[in-house]
């Protein structure tokens, strides 16, 4: 029973390029959450998606960041025109429902912007 | 969501019980207490959660005071692999978790 999978595990981009981070939730989970962790800081919520719908994007920066969770395939967090401040670990979590359930986290994608 | 306060760091001898406190004096009646931990650079791991009764699972026990203003996570026999940052989170639903600074637990051989 595979856990939450994220790829790539490490991603290096130059300033101005695009970064695409993928998250495959646990089998049977239709709720996905993205968090960002800057160096030496705690995790910060970014966005909560249910299949094909964005439920809460209150933590997403207004520009350059977008997320989707299509009917088929993994959830994608997309960062356009990356800047050095985007360097962080990005964690995805999934849960079977949206209420009172623990979230299962993936291993994270470490983005480095040169 | 209620704010939580945790000590920044704690040490515990290997094999002894680790008791991690959390204050949440502004918790409301329908808010749950969740505990997660993050072992160095890994994704956070769910430990346990509760509303008002004490809870126990294979990893830990959660003791919530009667007035629900504080709680304690107990790792009964700490091992070196329990060294991690432990987060106490109070939330009505599971839509988004607010991770504060947590408690950095170091288990000492």
Image (tube, rainbow, N blue to C red):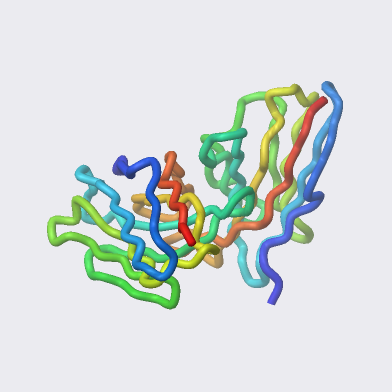
- Residue A70 visible in the displayed image: no
- The residue sitting at 63% across, 48% down in the picture is B41
Q: Looking at the picture, how far across and down is residue A90, in whole percent?
A: 67, 43
Quarter where residue A59 is shown = top right
Query: Residue A30, position in %: x, y?
Result: 61, 63
Residue drawn 72% across the image and 54% down it: A23
Residue sitting nearer the eye, A48 or A54: A48
Which quadrant holds the N terminus of chain B? top left
The residue lying at 25 percent from left, 65 percent from top is B63
Is residue A86 at all visible to an observer of this figure?
Answer: yes
The single residue placed furthest to the left in the displayed view is: B67
Residue plotted at (41% across, 70% down) = B15
Q: Taking A71 as reference, is B87 above or below it?
A: above
Q: Looking at the image, is B70 positioned above or below residue A90?
A: below
Looking at the image, residue B83 sits to the left or right of residue A77; the answer is left
Q: Position of residue A64 (x, y in %)?
A: 72, 27
- Between B49 and B76, the one nearer to me in the picture: B76
Q: Is residue B22 left or right of residue A109?
A: left
| Outermost residue, front side | B109
Instruction: Judge by depth and name the residue closer to the eye, B61 or A99.
Output: B61
The image quadrant of residue B65 is bottom left
């Amino acid at each position: 029973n595979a856990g939450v999978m994220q790829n790539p595990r490490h991603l290096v981009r130059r300033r101005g390029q695009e970064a695409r981070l993928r998250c495959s939730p646990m089998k049977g989970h239709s709720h996905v959450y993205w968090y960002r962790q800057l160096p030496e800081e705690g995790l910060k919520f970014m966005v909560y998606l249910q299949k094909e719908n964005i439920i809460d994007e209150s933590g997403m920066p207004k520009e350059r960041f977008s997320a989707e969770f299509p009917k088929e395939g993994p959830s994608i967090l997309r960062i356009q025109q990356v800047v050095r401040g985007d360097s962080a670990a990005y964690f995805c979590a999934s849960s079977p429902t949206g209420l009172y359930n623990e979230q299962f986290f993936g291993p994270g994608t470490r983005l480095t912007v040169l | 969501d209620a704010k939580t306060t945790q000590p920044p760091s704690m040490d515990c001898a290997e094999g002894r019980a680790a008791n991690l406190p959390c204050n949440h004096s502004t918790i409301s009646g329908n808010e749950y207490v969740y505990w997660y931990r993050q072992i160095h650079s890994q994704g956070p791991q769910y430990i346990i959660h509760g509303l008002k009764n004490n809870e126990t699972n294979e990893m830990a026990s959660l003791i919530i005071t009667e007035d629900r203003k504080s709680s304690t996570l107990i790792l009964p026999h700490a091992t070196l692999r329990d060294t991690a940052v432990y987060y106490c989170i109070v939330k009505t639903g599971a839509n988004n978790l607010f991770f504060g600074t947590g408690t950095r637990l170091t288990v000492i051989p």
